[in-house]
């Protein structure tokens, strides 16, 4: 067995998986509370990548940034996260909130519309060409290695910051007051509102957090893979959602696990399966179908018991 | 005999088996007033055959009065989209399943037809068999995709089918260089270049060749499917689908075979899409991967949703609007007229009473002329841009700022337009009227300087996306649909 190929694929799989996991978290959190598939989530991720690019260029560009490189990267993340969080709140307020008591299919179609609107607005405003983060000039091409395992700085950065964000999110949901309110709302929205929880505010904050994570994921993806364009959110959103379903939708650790699995599956498919680089998405799709057939509630999800 | 069995109900009592909503339908019908009310009453009470004729007669006259190019763009393509809409209407409208891989079935139809009838593959089947095969393949694939998804809650179906649609595009893009286990290297779909040189339709010896003939053929096919669907929707299965859509749990409790019904609706929709695909493939004399992408999916969804999910007449009207208006937008001069007419109509319909109307119209005009005057006097760069061609564009240039380098500022204006429209939905009373003035102006500014350049691409799809959101918020039942009645 060729171990160096294996480790290369694993590293890139884990990197990709961290990105997918962050996207999946947003899907999963929103689904947990609203039972709504937020199709626009992938496009929020795309907007995040663009916001990071704008932040980078307002700070002088990758070749001669006006601050230290680490500060520039931190500011890119901060700007993309805040902008995307705000965008998520706006989308929720205007496209989903009025439909909260409508038949199930109405908000789904509204979400589809928002997704398409964002994609084409990006095409209109930012143009159809690819944009490059040029991470090489910003961060440099240094790699760390341990035996056969090689990690570039952006990869390391992605994995570490993804883990940090996930720990932060877990603590937020488990320990804080707003986290408690979120759990209560997702358990039973009506009962939560009777207990004095401002459900609208909880849902808005869920959208803010989920979208901010997607924005961070967009910047991470762009730092590692370089290029961004208006349609990048579609596939990433699809994979993120697949990750959420595989892990068990509504479950936060499930989304992390699912993201990792999808990233690794995609990466190994590229390396080991016939015509993997062309058909990697089909392999991920096959994985989704297989898991849905065997365990429809996902790996870490609980089977849904419906009370009437 | 039957009459005696029906219980005689006193006139002041509600009829048995008929709830309050149904019993009061006459009263509601009487409430429509004016010429619109008359038309709606006539439409509501007309028998289905008359309604069908109301569409067929103009559709039959259309090719006699128009040019070849217009017949293709407005007639034939609208019919193909309407046929697709009919199929989606079964899955989404009747059964309430969110099928986002629908376009893939359309693609399966086109590729199957091309596979058995084209110079590319060297097979030349008669169209009556090729079309049947295309329908069968699409239905079979629908069955295979629907099978794992059928036990899933509605939302999972959406994601599985969305992924499936994407997988289809990836597959046809690359299927020209797959090595199969036994057959070896085979070119299945022509890859990114598409499956070209597809035969024209050849039905029982009638070779369909010109646009006009295709139009007649598609019109016939459409009418056939329409009549079929009318009977299906009134049948036991059709009613069961609608029950399923309204409340799956209640349907299951009523011992309806929910899974089988879902699968049936799914396969039925897929079969119609396959049929449409075969026609489309022969019209285009080719099947290209780019034709079966998300853009078309959104277009067909917009058709079904705008017309009213579950309504057959709505599909026609939806297809006319959703395909017709963007086609008009392709020509900048026409696009200008469409935009300002829509704007004026919207303001006329939405702004009441007349004092506010006068304020909005007067305010907007005054704002524009004032800005142009100021710019002319002090900032000539802001009016240095070239107005578009045509009379309307010339008039508008007296009222609208046209900067010489509009890109950056127009981008901001676009963002500002969205923000202002969102704010507008939150305001009430005179505040709304006043904010409406700058909103209209900024929107027109973004239109003139940014959106008008992209009317064939981004603008068209962007408007469709916005249309879906607005419709869901303002009128979820669409133009012809019936509003959902909650009886608790």
Image (tube, helix red, strand yellow):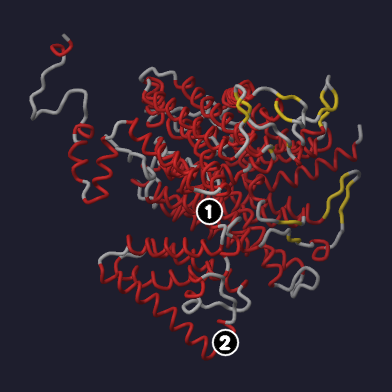
Q: Quadrant of residue B462?
A: bottom right
Tell me: B217 left or right of A228.
left
The front one of B448 and B141 is B448
Give the number of the disc on residue B326.
1
Q: Is residue B23 above or below residue B462?
A: above
Where's the N terminus of chain B, which quadrant?
A: top left
Label at residue B263: none
> Residue reaching furthest front?
B64
Secondary structure beneath dot 1 equals: helix
Report the residue marked by disc 2. Answer: B380
Badge 1: chain ID? B
From this viewpoint, is residue A192 visible?
A: no
Residue B188 seen: yes
Find residue A15 and report its horizontal and vertical position in percent: 75, 47
Q: Is residue A269 left or right of residue A213?
A: right
Quadrant occupied by the C terminus of chain B: top left
Please identify the residue farthest to the top as the structure is shown. Answer: B1
> Nearer the observer, disc 1 or disc 2?
1
Q: Residue at x 13, y 12 (%)?
A: B4
**Quick one: label 1 or label 2, which is nearer the N terminus?**
1
Position of residue A78 relative to residue B295, above or below, is below
In this view of the protein, which residue sits in the foreground, B248 or A224?
A: B248
- Element class at badge 2: helix
Q: Residue at x 78, y 56 (%)?
A: A154
Q: In this rendering, is residue B121 above or below A149?
A: above
- The 10 Å Cα crowd at callout 1, few under 14, some 14 to 19, many 20 or more, is many
Is disc 2 surrounded by few (<14), some (14 to 19) or many (20+) residues within 10 Å?
some
State how far apart marks 1 and 2 are (Cα).
34 Å
């Amino acid at each position: 067995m060729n171990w160096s190929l294996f480790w290369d694929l694993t590293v890139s799989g884990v990197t990709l998986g961290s990105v997918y996991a962050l996207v999946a978290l947003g899907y999963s959190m929103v689904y947990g509370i609203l039972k709504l598939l937020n199709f626009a989530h992938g496009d929020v991720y795309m907007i995040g990548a663009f916001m990071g690019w704008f932040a980078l260029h307002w700070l002088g560009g990758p070749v001669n940034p006006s601050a230290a490189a680490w500060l520039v990267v931190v500011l890119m993340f901060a700007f993309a996260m805040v902008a995307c969080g705000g965008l998520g709140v706006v989308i929720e307020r205007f496209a989903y909130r009025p439909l909260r008591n409508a038949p199930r299919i109405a908000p789904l179609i509204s979400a589809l519309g928002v997704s398409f609107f964002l994609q084409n607005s990006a095409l209109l405003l930012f143009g159809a060409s690819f944009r490059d983060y040029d991470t090489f000039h910003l961060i440099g091409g240094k790699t760390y290695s341990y035996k056969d395992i090689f990690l570039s700085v952006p990869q390391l950065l992605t994995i570490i910051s993804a883990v940090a964000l996930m720990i932060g999110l877990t603590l937020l949901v488990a320990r804080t007051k707003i986290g408690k309110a979120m759990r209560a709302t997702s358990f039973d929205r009506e009962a939560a509102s009777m207990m004095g929880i401002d459900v609208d505010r909880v849902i808005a904050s869920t959208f803010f957090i989920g979208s901010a994570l997607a924005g961070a994921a967009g910047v991470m993806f762009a730092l590692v893979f370089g290029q961004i364009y208006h349609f990048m959110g579609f596939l990433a959103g699809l994979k993120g959602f697949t990750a959420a379903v595989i892990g068990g939708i509504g479950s936060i650790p499930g989304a992390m696990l699912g993201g990792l699995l999808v990233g690794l599956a995609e990466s190994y498919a590229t390396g080991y399966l016939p015509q993997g680089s062309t058909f990697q998405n089909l392999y991920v799709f096959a994985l989704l179908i297989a898991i849905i057939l065997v365990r429809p509630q996902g790996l870490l999800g609980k089977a849904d018991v419906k009370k009437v | 005999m039957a009459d005696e069995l029906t219980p005689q109900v006193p006139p002041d009592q509600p009829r048995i088996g008929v709830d309050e909503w149904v019993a009061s339908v006459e009263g509601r019908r009487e409430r429509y007033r004016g010429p619109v009310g008359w038309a709606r009453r006539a439409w509501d009470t007309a028998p289905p055959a008359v309604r069908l004729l109301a569409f067929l007669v103009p559709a039959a006259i259309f090719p006699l009065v128009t040019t070849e190019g217009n017949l293709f763009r407005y007639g034939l393509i609208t019919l193909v989209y309407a046929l697709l809409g009919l199929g989606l209407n079964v899955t989404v409208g009747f059964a309430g399943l969110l099928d986002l891989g629908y376009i893939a079935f359309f693609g399966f139809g086109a590729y199957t037809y091309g596979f058995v009838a084209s110079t590319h593959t060297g097979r030349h089947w008669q169209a009556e068999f090729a079309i049947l095969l295309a329908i069968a393949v699409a239905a079979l694939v629908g069955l295979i995709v629907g099978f794992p998804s059928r036990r899933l809650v509605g939302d999972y179906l959406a994601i599985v089918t969305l992924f499936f649609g994407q997988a289809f595009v990836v597959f046809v893009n690359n299927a020209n260089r797959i090595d199969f286990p036994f057959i070896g290297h085979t070119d299945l779909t022509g890859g990114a270049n598409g499956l070209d040189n597809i035969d024209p339709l050849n039905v029982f010896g009638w070779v369909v060749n010109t646009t006009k003939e295709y139009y007649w053929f598609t019109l016939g096919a459409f009418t056939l499917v329409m009549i079929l669907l009318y009977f299906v929707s009134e049948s036991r299965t059709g009613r069961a689908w609608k029950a399923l859509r309204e409340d799956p749990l209640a349907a299951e409790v009523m011992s309806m075979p929910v899974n089988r019904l879902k699968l049936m609706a799914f396969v039925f929709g897929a079969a119609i899409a396959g049929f449409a695909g075969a026609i489309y493939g022969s019209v285009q004399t080719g099947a290209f991967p780019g034709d079966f992408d998300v853009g078309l999916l959104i277009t067909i969804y917009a058709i079904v949703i705008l017309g009213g999910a579950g309504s057959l007449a709505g599909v026609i009207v939806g297809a006319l609007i959703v395909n017709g208006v963007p086609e008009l937008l392709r020509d900048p001069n026409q696009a200008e007229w469409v935009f300002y007419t829509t704007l004026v109509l919207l303001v006329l319909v939405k702004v009441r009473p007349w004092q506010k109307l006068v304020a909005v119209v007067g305010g907007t005009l005054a704002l524009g002329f004032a800005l142009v005057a100021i710019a002319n006097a002090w900032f000539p760069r802001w009016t240095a841009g070239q107005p578009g061609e045509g009379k309307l564009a010339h008039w508008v240039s007296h009222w609208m700022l046209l900067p010489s380098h509009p890109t950056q500022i127009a981008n901001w204006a676009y963002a500002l337009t969205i923000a202002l429209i969102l704010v507008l939905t939150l305001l009430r009373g005179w505040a709304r009227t006043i904010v409406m003035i700058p909103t209209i102006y900024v929107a027109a500014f973004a239109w003139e300087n940014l959106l008008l350049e992209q009317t064939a691409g981004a603008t068209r799809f962007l408007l469709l996306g916005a249309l879906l959101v607005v419709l869901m918020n303002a009128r979820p039942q669409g133009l012809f649909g019936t509003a959902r009645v909650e009886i608790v």
